[in-house]
Image: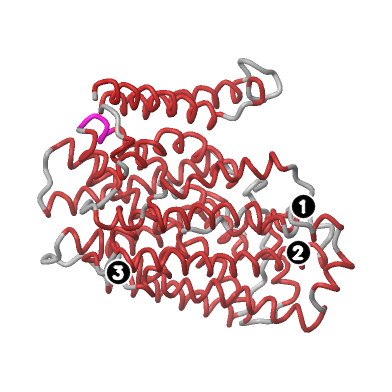
Amino acid sequence: MPDATLDRTLLHFTAADWTLVACYFVLLLYLGIRGRWKKEEREADYILGGRMLTLPGFVAALVTTWVWGILGVGEFSYTYGLSNWLVFGAPYYVFALIFAFAFARKVRESGMSTIPDMFYHRYGRNSGILGSVLVFLNSSPAPYTLMLAVLIQVVTGWPLVLSLIAGLIVSVVYVFIGGFRAVVRIDKLQFLLMFLGFFMLLAHLIPEHGFLDFLARELPPGHLTATGGHSVQYIAVWFFIALWTLVSPQFHQFTISARSPGTARSGIILSVGFWFVLDGITTFSGMYARALLPELGNAAMAYPLLADMVLPSVAKGLFFLGLLATVMSTNDGLMFISGLTAGRDIVAKCTGKEDEVSLRRYVRIGVLLTAFLSGAGALVFPSVIELWYVIGTLFIPALLLPLTAAYYPRLLIRPALTFVAMAGGFILSLGWFLVAQTGVATSDGRYPFDVEPMYIGLVFSAVVYLFGIGERKRRG
Protein backbone atom coordinates (compact mmCIF):
# COMPACT_ATOMS: atom_id res chain seq x y z
CA MET A 1 0.00 0.00 0.00
CA PRO A 2 1.37 3.45 -0.85
CA ASP A 3 1.97 6.22 1.65
CA ALA A 4 -0.48 5.84 4.53
CA THR A 5 -0.69 9.58 5.20
CA LEU A 6 -3.80 11.32 3.88
CA ASP A 7 -4.39 15.03 3.73
CA ARG A 8 -8.15 14.91 3.38
CA THR A 9 -11.18 12.79 4.17
CA LEU A 10 -12.27 10.37 1.44
CA LEU A 11 -15.65 9.31 2.79
CA HIS A 12 -18.02 12.17 3.47
CA PHE A 13 -20.42 11.23 6.25
CA THR A 14 -23.78 12.60 7.29
CA ALA A 15 -24.99 12.65 10.88
CA ALA A 16 -26.73 9.31 10.25
CA ASP A 17 -23.45 7.72 9.12
CA TRP A 18 -21.61 9.00 12.19
CA THR A 19 -24.40 7.68 14.40
CA LEU A 20 -23.93 4.19 12.93
CA VAL A 21 -20.18 4.34 13.55
CA ALA A 22 -20.68 5.53 17.13
CA CYS A 23 -23.17 2.73 17.80
CA TYR A 24 -20.71 0.21 16.38
CA PHE A 25 -17.93 1.23 18.74
CA VAL A 26 -20.27 1.29 21.74
CA LEU A 27 -21.44 -2.23 20.81
CA LEU A 28 -17.85 -3.44 20.52
CA LEU A 29 -17.03 -2.17 23.99
CA TYR A 30 -20.21 -3.69 25.41
CA LEU A 31 -19.48 -7.10 23.91
CA GLY A 32 -15.89 -6.92 25.13
CA ILE A 33 -16.77 -5.98 28.68
CA ARG A 34 -19.50 -8.62 28.74
CA GLY A 35 -16.83 -11.20 28.03
CA ARG A 36 -14.49 -10.00 30.78
CA TRP A 37 -12.25 -12.42 32.69
CA LYS A 38 -14.01 -12.97 36.00
CA LYS A 39 -12.02 -13.79 39.10
CA GLU A 40 -13.35 -17.33 39.19
CA GLU A 41 -12.71 -17.95 35.51
CA ARG A 42 -9.99 -20.47 34.77
CA GLU A 43 -7.05 -19.85 32.44
CA ALA A 44 -8.54 -22.20 29.82
CA ASP A 45 -11.73 -20.12 29.75
CA TYR A 46 -9.83 -16.89 29.12
CA ILE A 47 -7.45 -18.16 26.44
CA LEU A 48 -9.51 -20.97 24.85
CA GLY A 49 -13.13 -20.29 25.76
CA GLY A 50 -13.13 -23.57 27.71
CA ARG A 51 -12.35 -25.48 24.46
CA MET A 52 -16.04 -25.28 23.62
CA LEU A 53 -15.99 -23.17 20.44
CA THR A 54 -18.99 -24.22 18.35
CA LEU A 55 -19.08 -24.48 14.55
CA PRO A 56 -20.73 -21.06 13.94
CA GLY A 57 -18.31 -19.35 16.34
CA PHE A 58 -15.34 -21.18 14.83
CA VAL A 59 -16.25 -20.18 11.26
CA ALA A 60 -16.98 -16.56 12.19
CA ALA A 61 -13.71 -16.24 14.11
CA LEU A 62 -11.50 -17.93 11.53
CA VAL A 63 -13.04 -16.25 8.48
CA THR A 64 -12.76 -12.78 9.97
CA THR A 65 -9.26 -13.13 11.43
CA TRP A 66 -7.62 -14.85 8.44
CA VAL A 67 -8.21 -12.35 5.64
CA TRP A 68 -5.81 -10.14 3.75
CA GLY A 69 -5.90 -6.46 4.57
CA ILE A 70 -8.87 -5.02 2.78
CA LEU A 71 -7.11 -1.91 1.44
CA GLY A 72 -4.35 -4.06 -0.07
CA VAL A 73 -6.98 -6.27 -1.69
CA GLY A 74 -8.65 -3.17 -3.10
CA GLU A 75 -5.34 -1.96 -4.51
CA PHE A 76 -4.49 -5.31 -6.12
CA SER A 77 -7.94 -5.96 -7.63
CA TYR A 78 -8.07 -2.37 -8.93
CA THR A 79 -4.67 -2.81 -10.58
CA TYR A 80 -4.81 -6.45 -11.73
CA GLY A 81 -8.46 -7.52 -11.71
CA LEU A 82 -9.49 -11.17 -11.39
CA SER A 83 -5.96 -12.32 -10.60
CA ASN A 84 -6.59 -11.05 -7.06
CA TRP A 85 -8.74 -14.17 -6.63
CA LEU A 86 -5.87 -16.39 -7.75
CA VAL A 87 -2.97 -14.64 -5.98
CA PHE A 88 -4.61 -13.77 -2.64
CA GLY A 89 -7.18 -16.55 -2.65
CA ALA A 90 -6.27 -19.89 -4.23
CA PRO A 91 -2.96 -20.51 -2.41
CA TYR A 92 -4.66 -19.98 0.94
CA TYR A 93 -7.57 -22.26 0.07
CA VAL A 94 -5.07 -25.00 -0.75
CA PHE A 95 -3.09 -24.72 2.48
CA ALA A 96 -6.21 -24.21 4.60
CA LEU A 97 -7.55 -27.52 3.29
CA ILE A 98 -4.17 -29.16 3.92
CA PHE A 99 -4.37 -27.89 7.49
CA ALA A 100 -7.94 -29.21 7.82
CA PHE A 101 -7.07 -32.75 6.74
CA ALA A 102 -3.45 -33.06 7.89
CA PHE A 103 -3.28 -31.00 11.08
CA ALA A 104 -6.70 -30.17 12.57
CA ARG A 105 -7.26 -33.45 14.42
CA LYS A 106 -3.66 -33.66 15.64
CA VAL A 107 -3.70 -30.05 16.87
CA ARG A 108 -7.05 -30.44 18.69
CA GLU A 109 -6.09 -33.75 20.30
CA SER A 110 -2.61 -32.61 21.33
CA GLY A 111 -3.87 -31.27 24.65
CA MET A 112 -1.73 -28.15 24.20
CA SER A 113 -3.04 -24.61 24.64
CA THR A 114 -0.77 -22.74 22.21
CA ILE A 115 1.88 -23.34 19.53
CA PRO A 116 4.68 -22.56 22.03
CA ASP A 117 3.23 -25.22 24.35
CA MET A 118 3.95 -27.78 21.65
CA PHE A 119 7.51 -26.48 21.22
CA TYR A 120 8.17 -26.75 24.95
CA HIS A 121 6.65 -30.23 25.00
CA ARG A 122 8.55 -31.61 22.01
CA TYR A 123 11.85 -29.74 22.09
CA GLY A 124 12.49 -28.49 25.61
CA ARG A 125 13.05 -25.09 27.19
CA ASN A 126 15.50 -23.49 24.74
CA SER A 127 13.50 -24.24 21.61
CA GLY A 128 10.32 -23.45 23.51
CA ILE A 129 11.50 -19.96 24.38
CA LEU A 130 12.86 -19.34 20.87
CA GLY A 131 9.65 -20.67 19.33
CA SER A 132 7.61 -18.43 21.62
CA VAL A 133 9.55 -15.35 20.55
CA LEU A 134 9.15 -16.26 16.88
CA VAL A 135 5.41 -16.90 17.28
CA PHE A 136 5.06 -13.59 19.12
CA LEU A 137 6.71 -11.72 16.25
CA ASN A 138 4.86 -13.76 13.61
CA SER A 139 1.57 -12.83 15.29
CA SER A 140 2.19 -9.11 15.04
CA PRO A 141 -0.99 -7.19 14.19
CA ALA A 142 1.10 -4.26 12.85
CA PRO A 143 -0.22 -4.48 9.25
CA TYR A 144 -3.80 -4.36 10.48
CA THR A 145 -3.07 -1.67 13.05
CA LEU A 146 -1.81 0.43 10.15
CA MET A 147 -4.89 -0.29 8.03
CA LEU A 148 -7.17 0.55 10.93
CA ALA A 149 -5.39 3.89 11.33
CA VAL A 150 -5.75 4.59 7.60
CA LEU A 151 -9.48 3.82 7.73
CA ILE A 152 -9.86 6.24 10.63
CA GLN A 153 -8.01 8.83 8.54
CA VAL A 154 -10.38 8.19 5.64
CA VAL A 155 -13.32 9.64 7.56
CA THR A 156 -11.62 12.05 9.98
CA GLY A 157 -8.59 13.43 8.16
CA TRP A 158 -6.58 13.07 11.39
CA PRO A 159 -2.78 12.63 11.30
CA LEU A 160 -1.56 9.03 11.13
CA VAL A 161 -0.18 8.99 14.68
CA LEU A 162 -3.46 10.22 16.17
CA SER A 163 -5.41 7.69 14.11
CA LEU A 164 -3.07 4.92 15.28
CA ILE A 165 -3.61 5.85 18.90
CA ALA A 166 -7.40 5.98 18.51
CA GLY A 167 -7.54 2.59 16.81
CA LEU A 168 -5.25 0.96 19.35
CA ILE A 169 -7.22 2.28 22.32
CA VAL A 170 -10.47 0.74 21.07
CA SER A 171 -8.86 -2.61 20.19
CA VAL A 172 -6.89 -2.88 23.41
CA VAL A 173 -9.83 -2.16 25.70
CA TYR A 174 -12.02 -5.11 24.76
CA VAL A 175 -9.14 -7.54 24.17
CA PHE A 176 -7.55 -6.52 27.49
CA ILE A 177 -10.77 -7.00 29.43
CA GLY A 178 -12.60 -9.81 27.64
CA GLY A 179 -9.96 -12.22 26.34
CA PHE A 180 -10.80 -15.02 23.90
CA ARG A 181 -14.55 -15.05 24.53
CA ALA A 182 -14.80 -11.35 23.74
CA VAL A 183 -12.79 -11.78 20.53
CA VAL A 184 -15.08 -14.58 19.29
CA ARG A 185 -18.25 -12.75 20.30
CA ILE A 186 -17.17 -9.62 18.45
CA ASP A 187 -16.02 -11.65 15.43
CA LYS A 188 -19.61 -12.86 14.93
CA LEU A 189 -20.75 -9.26 14.56
CA GLN A 190 -17.84 -8.40 12.29
CA PHE A 191 -18.48 -11.45 10.11
CA LEU A 192 -21.96 -10.15 9.33
CA LEU A 193 -20.78 -6.60 8.69
CA MET A 194 -17.95 -7.47 6.30
CA PHE A 195 -20.22 -9.50 4.01
CA LEU A 196 -23.12 -7.05 4.31
CA GLY A 197 -20.94 -4.09 3.33
CA PHE A 198 -19.64 -5.55 0.06
CA PHE A 199 -22.91 -7.22 -0.98
CA MET A 200 -24.61 -3.87 -0.46
CA LEU A 201 -22.00 -2.10 -2.60
CA LEU A 202 -22.46 -4.58 -5.46
CA ALA A 203 -26.24 -4.33 -5.05
CA HIS A 204 -25.92 -0.64 -5.93
CA LEU A 205 -23.43 -1.16 -8.76
CA ILE A 206 -24.80 -4.12 -10.73
CA PRO A 207 -28.36 -2.85 -11.40
CA GLU A 208 -27.07 0.54 -12.53
CA HIS A 209 -24.10 -0.51 -14.67
CA GLY A 210 -24.51 -4.19 -15.46
CA PHE A 211 -22.03 -6.92 -14.62
CA LEU A 212 -19.55 -8.84 -16.76
CA ASP A 213 -20.47 -7.11 -20.03
CA PHE A 214 -19.87 -3.70 -18.43
CA LEU A 215 -16.56 -4.76 -16.86
CA ALA A 216 -15.40 -6.31 -20.15
CA ARG A 217 -16.05 -3.01 -21.96
CA GLU A 218 -14.49 -0.70 -19.37
CA LEU A 219 -11.47 -2.62 -18.08
CA PRO A 220 -8.08 -3.40 -19.65
CA PRO A 221 -8.14 -6.92 -21.19
CA GLY A 222 -5.76 -8.34 -18.59
CA HIS A 223 -8.19 -7.59 -15.78
CA LEU A 224 -10.49 -10.40 -16.90
CA THR A 225 -7.76 -13.05 -17.10
CA ALA A 226 -6.86 -15.40 -14.26
CA THR A 227 -3.23 -14.26 -14.09
CA GLY A 228 -3.71 -10.52 -14.69
CA GLY A 229 -0.59 -10.54 -16.83
CA HIS A 230 1.60 -12.00 -14.07
CA SER A 231 4.13 -14.72 -14.78
CA VAL A 232 3.77 -18.25 -13.47
CA GLN A 233 6.87 -17.64 -11.33
CA TYR A 234 5.26 -14.61 -9.69
CA ILE A 235 2.12 -16.56 -8.83
CA ALA A 236 4.22 -19.49 -7.55
CA VAL A 237 5.89 -17.14 -5.06
CA TRP A 238 2.50 -16.48 -3.47
CA PHE A 239 2.01 -20.21 -2.96
CA PHE A 240 5.23 -20.20 -0.94
CA ILE A 241 4.01 -17.20 1.04
CA ALA A 242 0.75 -19.08 1.66
CA LEU A 243 2.76 -21.60 3.69
CA TRP A 244 2.10 -19.00 6.38
CA THR A 245 -1.26 -20.75 6.82
CA LEU A 246 0.39 -23.84 8.31
CA VAL A 247 2.17 -21.79 11.00
CA SER A 248 -0.68 -19.33 11.50
CA PRO A 249 -1.39 -18.71 15.20
CA GLN A 250 -5.04 -18.09 14.31
CA PHE A 251 -5.52 -21.53 12.76
CA HIS A 252 -3.89 -23.22 15.73
CA GLN A 253 -5.63 -21.12 18.38
CA PHE A 254 -9.14 -21.66 17.03
CA THR A 255 -8.52 -25.34 16.31
CA ILE A 256 -7.29 -25.89 19.87
CA SER A 257 -10.38 -24.04 21.13
CA ALA A 258 -12.88 -26.02 19.03
CA ARG A 259 -15.43 -28.26 20.72
CA SER A 260 -14.07 -31.30 18.86
CA PRO A 261 -11.64 -32.24 16.06
CA GLY A 262 -14.63 -32.63 13.74
CA THR A 263 -15.78 -29.11 14.54
CA ALA A 264 -12.34 -27.77 13.64
CA ARG A 265 -12.09 -29.69 10.35
CA SER A 266 -15.62 -28.85 9.25
CA GLY A 267 -15.13 -25.25 10.31
CA ILE A 268 -12.01 -24.84 8.18
CA ILE A 269 -13.71 -26.39 5.13
CA LEU A 270 -16.72 -24.08 5.54
CA SER A 271 -14.37 -21.14 6.04
CA VAL A 272 -12.73 -21.82 2.68
CA GLY A 273 -16.17 -21.51 1.07
CA PHE A 274 -16.80 -18.18 2.78
CA TRP A 275 -13.33 -16.92 1.81
CA PHE A 276 -14.08 -17.86 -1.80
CA VAL A 277 -17.25 -15.75 -1.72
CA LEU A 278 -15.56 -12.86 0.11
CA ASP A 279 -12.65 -12.85 -2.35
CA GLY A 280 -15.15 -12.77 -5.20
CA ILE A 281 -17.18 -9.82 -3.98
CA THR A 282 -14.10 -7.82 -2.97
CA THR A 283 -12.38 -8.56 -6.31
CA PHE A 284 -15.38 -7.45 -8.35
CA SER A 285 -15.75 -4.34 -6.18
CA GLY A 286 -12.14 -3.42 -6.97
CA MET A 287 -12.76 -3.99 -10.67
CA TYR A 288 -15.80 -1.70 -10.58
CA ALA A 289 -13.62 0.92 -8.95
CA ARG A 290 -11.15 0.68 -11.85
CA ALA A 291 -13.97 0.93 -14.39
CA LEU A 292 -15.64 3.93 -12.76
CA LEU A 293 -12.52 5.68 -11.40
CA PRO A 294 -9.84 4.89 -13.99
CA GLU A 295 -7.53 7.77 -13.03
CA LEU A 296 -7.32 7.00 -9.32
CA GLY A 297 -4.05 8.29 -7.88
CA ASN A 298 -3.90 5.96 -4.88
CA ALA A 299 -5.28 2.51 -5.74
CA ALA A 300 -5.29 1.51 -2.07
CA MET A 301 -8.17 3.95 -1.61
CA ALA A 302 -10.27 2.25 -4.31
CA TYR A 303 -13.00 1.01 -1.97
CA PRO A 304 -13.51 4.21 0.06
CA LEU A 305 -13.60 6.40 -3.04
CA LEU A 306 -15.97 4.04 -4.88
CA ALA A 307 -18.30 3.96 -1.88
CA ASP A 308 -18.24 7.74 -1.61
CA MET A 309 -19.16 7.96 -5.28
CA VAL A 310 -22.07 5.50 -5.45
CA LEU A 311 -23.56 4.95 -1.98
CA PRO A 312 -26.16 7.15 -0.29
CA SER A 313 -26.12 8.10 3.38
CA VAL A 314 -26.55 5.21 5.83
CA ALA A 315 -25.46 2.70 3.15
CA LYS A 316 -22.12 4.52 3.10
CA GLY A 317 -21.85 4.25 6.86
CA LEU A 318 -22.68 0.54 6.76
CA PHE A 319 -20.08 -0.07 4.08
CA PHE A 320 -17.46 1.73 6.14
CA LEU A 321 -18.37 -0.49 9.09
CA GLY A 322 -17.79 -3.48 6.80
CA LEU A 323 -14.29 -2.19 6.03
CA LEU A 324 -13.66 -1.56 9.72
CA ALA A 325 -14.92 -5.02 10.66
CA THR A 326 -12.64 -6.70 8.12
CA VAL A 327 -9.57 -4.99 9.58
CA MET A 328 -10.49 -4.94 13.27
CA SER A 329 -11.38 -8.63 13.40
CA THR A 330 -7.87 -9.61 12.37
CA ASN A 331 -6.26 -6.87 14.44
CA ASP A 332 -7.95 -7.87 17.70
CA GLY A 333 -7.44 -11.61 17.11
CA LEU A 334 -3.73 -11.19 16.51
CA MET A 335 -3.40 -8.72 19.37
CA PHE A 336 -4.86 -11.28 21.76
CA ILE A 337 -2.72 -14.16 20.45
CA SER A 338 0.45 -12.07 20.46
CA GLY A 339 -0.25 -10.76 23.96
CA LEU A 340 -1.02 -14.29 25.15
CA THR A 341 2.26 -15.56 23.72
CA ALA A 342 4.28 -12.76 25.31
CA GLY A 343 2.64 -13.05 28.71
CA ARG A 344 1.97 -16.76 29.11
CA ASP A 345 4.55 -18.48 26.91
CA ILE A 346 7.52 -16.17 27.42
CA VAL A 347 7.30 -14.18 30.66
CA ALA A 348 5.45 -16.78 32.76
CA LYS A 349 7.71 -19.60 31.56
CA CYS A 350 10.88 -17.61 32.19
CA THR A 351 9.83 -16.44 35.65
CA GLY A 352 8.20 -19.71 36.70
CA LYS A 353 5.13 -17.81 37.92
CA GLU A 354 2.24 -19.62 36.24
CA ASP A 355 -0.55 -19.21 38.78
CA GLU A 356 -3.86 -17.69 37.64
CA VAL A 357 -3.18 -14.23 39.12
CA SER A 358 0.29 -13.97 37.53
CA LEU A 359 -0.96 -15.26 34.17
CA ARG A 360 -3.76 -12.70 34.14
CA ARG A 361 -1.29 -9.91 34.81
CA TYR A 362 1.32 -11.14 32.31
CA VAL A 363 -1.18 -11.65 29.48
CA ARG A 364 -2.60 -8.18 29.96
CA ILE A 365 0.88 -6.69 29.99
CA GLY A 366 1.56 -8.71 26.82
CA VAL A 367 -1.47 -7.16 25.13
CA LEU A 368 -0.22 -3.66 26.00
CA LEU A 369 3.28 -4.52 24.75
CA THR A 370 1.81 -5.89 21.52
CA ALA A 371 -0.20 -2.72 20.99
CA PHE A 372 2.91 -0.57 21.49
CA LEU A 373 5.08 -2.66 19.14
CA SER A 374 2.41 -2.91 16.46
CA GLY A 375 1.96 0.85 16.51
CA ALA A 376 5.73 1.33 16.26
CA GLY A 377 5.93 -1.20 13.42
CA ALA A 378 3.20 0.63 11.53
CA LEU A 379 5.20 3.86 11.77
CA VAL A 380 8.52 2.26 10.77
CA PHE A 381 7.00 0.37 7.79
CA PRO A 382 4.13 2.59 6.60
CA SER A 383 3.16 0.05 3.93
CA VAL A 384 0.83 -2.88 4.59
CA ILE A 385 2.29 -4.99 1.81
CA GLU A 386 5.83 -4.40 3.10
CA LEU A 387 4.78 -5.43 6.61
CA TRP A 388 3.20 -8.64 5.28
CA TYR A 389 6.31 -9.38 3.28
CA VAL A 390 8.70 -8.84 6.18
CA ILE A 391 6.71 -10.98 8.62
CA GLY A 392 6.19 -13.86 6.17
CA THR A 393 9.76 -13.80 4.88
CA LEU A 394 11.43 -13.95 8.28
CA PHE A 395 9.28 -16.32 10.30
CA ILE A 396 7.92 -18.99 7.95
CA PRO A 397 11.38 -20.59 7.43
CA ALA A 398 12.02 -20.79 11.18
CA LEU A 399 8.64 -22.24 12.17
CA LEU A 400 7.40 -24.42 9.31
CA LEU A 401 9.41 -27.64 9.71
CA PRO A 402 9.68 -27.63 13.53
CA LEU A 403 5.92 -27.14 13.88
CA THR A 404 5.14 -29.80 11.25
CA ALA A 405 7.49 -32.28 12.93
CA ALA A 406 5.90 -31.60 16.30
CA TYR A 407 2.70 -33.20 15.01
CA TYR A 408 4.41 -35.85 12.85
CA PRO A 409 6.95 -37.64 15.09
CA ARG A 410 8.57 -39.43 12.14
CA LEU A 411 10.04 -36.07 11.18
CA LEU A 412 11.39 -35.28 14.65
CA ILE A 413 15.10 -34.61 15.07
CA ARG A 414 17.18 -33.94 18.17
CA PRO A 415 16.07 -30.86 20.16
CA ALA A 416 19.53 -29.31 19.71
CA LEU A 417 19.26 -29.64 15.92
CA THR A 418 15.71 -28.30 16.03
CA PHE A 419 17.02 -25.20 17.79
CA VAL A 420 19.70 -24.82 15.08
CA ALA A 421 17.07 -25.15 12.32
CA MET A 422 14.83 -22.55 13.95
CA ALA A 423 17.55 -20.05 14.81
CA GLY A 424 19.45 -20.52 11.56
CA GLY A 425 16.33 -20.30 9.40
CA PHE A 426 15.42 -17.00 11.02
CA ILE A 427 18.93 -15.50 11.14
CA LEU A 428 19.77 -16.37 7.53
CA SER A 429 16.45 -15.00 6.24
CA LEU A 430 16.95 -11.83 8.30
CA GLY A 431 20.55 -11.44 7.13
CA TRP A 432 19.62 -11.91 3.47
CA PHE A 433 16.80 -9.39 3.91
CA LEU A 434 19.13 -6.82 5.49
CA VAL A 435 21.73 -7.28 2.75
CA ALA A 436 19.25 -5.90 0.26
CA GLN A 437 17.85 -3.22 2.55
CA THR A 438 21.28 -1.81 3.38
CA GLY A 439 22.61 -2.06 -0.19
CA VAL A 440 25.67 -4.04 0.93
CA ALA A 441 25.59 -6.47 -2.00
CA THR A 442 23.62 -4.57 -4.65
CA SER A 443 23.21 -0.85 -5.11
CA ASP A 444 19.61 -1.11 -6.36
CA GLY A 445 18.21 -2.90 -3.29
CA ARG A 446 17.82 -6.27 -5.03
CA TYR A 447 18.62 -9.54 -3.34
CA PRO A 448 21.86 -11.30 -4.33
CA PHE A 449 21.20 -13.58 -7.33
CA ASP A 450 17.54 -12.44 -7.10
CA VAL A 451 16.90 -15.09 -4.45
CA GLU A 452 14.21 -14.23 -1.89
CA PRO A 453 15.20 -14.41 1.82
CA MET A 454 12.46 -16.96 2.52
CA TYR A 455 14.12 -19.50 0.23
CA ILE A 456 17.48 -19.14 2.01
CA GLY A 457 15.93 -19.84 5.39
CA LEU A 458 13.76 -22.71 4.11
CA VAL A 459 16.70 -24.43 2.42
CA PHE A 460 18.85 -24.16 5.54
CA SER A 461 16.09 -25.54 7.75
CA ALA A 462 15.42 -28.39 5.30
CA VAL A 463 19.13 -29.33 5.18
CA VAL A 464 19.29 -29.46 8.99
CA TYR A 465 16.20 -31.67 9.07
CA LEU A 466 17.55 -34.01 6.39
CA PHE A 467 20.77 -34.35 8.37
CA GLY A 468 18.86 -34.93 11.61
CA ILE A 469 16.54 -37.54 10.11
CA GLY A 470 19.53 -39.33 8.57
CA GLU A 471 21.31 -39.25 11.90
CA ARG A 472 18.31 -40.76 13.65
CA LYS A 473 18.04 -43.57 11.09
CA ARG A 474 21.75 -44.40 11.42
CA ARG A 475 21.33 -44.72 15.16
CA GLY A 476 18.35 -47.02 14.60
Crowding around mark 1 (Cα neighbors within 10 Å: few <14, some 14 to 19, many 20+) is: many
Who is closer to the viewer here, 472 or 143? 472
- Magenta: main secondary structure equals helix
Q: Which residues are magenta?
A: 125-129
- Using the image as rendered, state which of residue 19 and residue 185 is in the foreground: 185
Residue type at numbered disc 1: Gly
Residue to which mark 1 is pinned = 228
Disc number lying in front (2 or 1)? 1
Look at the picture and state if 200 lies above or below 108: below
Q: Residue furthest top?
A: 441
Question: Mark 2 to mark 1: distance in Å?
Answer: 12 Å
**Element on which disc 1 rests:** loop
Under tag 3, what secondary structure? Answer: loop
Residue 75 percent location from the top left of the image: 69, 55
* Residue marked by disc 3: 53
Residue 6 lies in the magenta-colored region: no
Q: Position of residue 133 (x, y in %)?
A: 33, 37
SS at badge 2: helix
Task: Give the residue pinned by disc 2.
Answer: 287
Q: Percent from the top left, x then y, of residue 419?
A: 31, 27
* Residue 433 locus on image (x, y percent): 55, 27
- At label 3, the amino acid type is Leu
Which residue appears at 14% of the width and 49% of the height? 358
Residue drawn 39% across and 37% down? 399
Q: CA distance from mark 2 to mark 3?
A: 37 Å
State the CA–CA distance, disc 3 to disc 1.
39 Å
25 and 126: which one is in front? 126
The quarter holding residue 321 reads: bottom right
- Neighbor class of circle 3 (other Cα within 10 Å; few <14, some 14-19, many 20+) is many
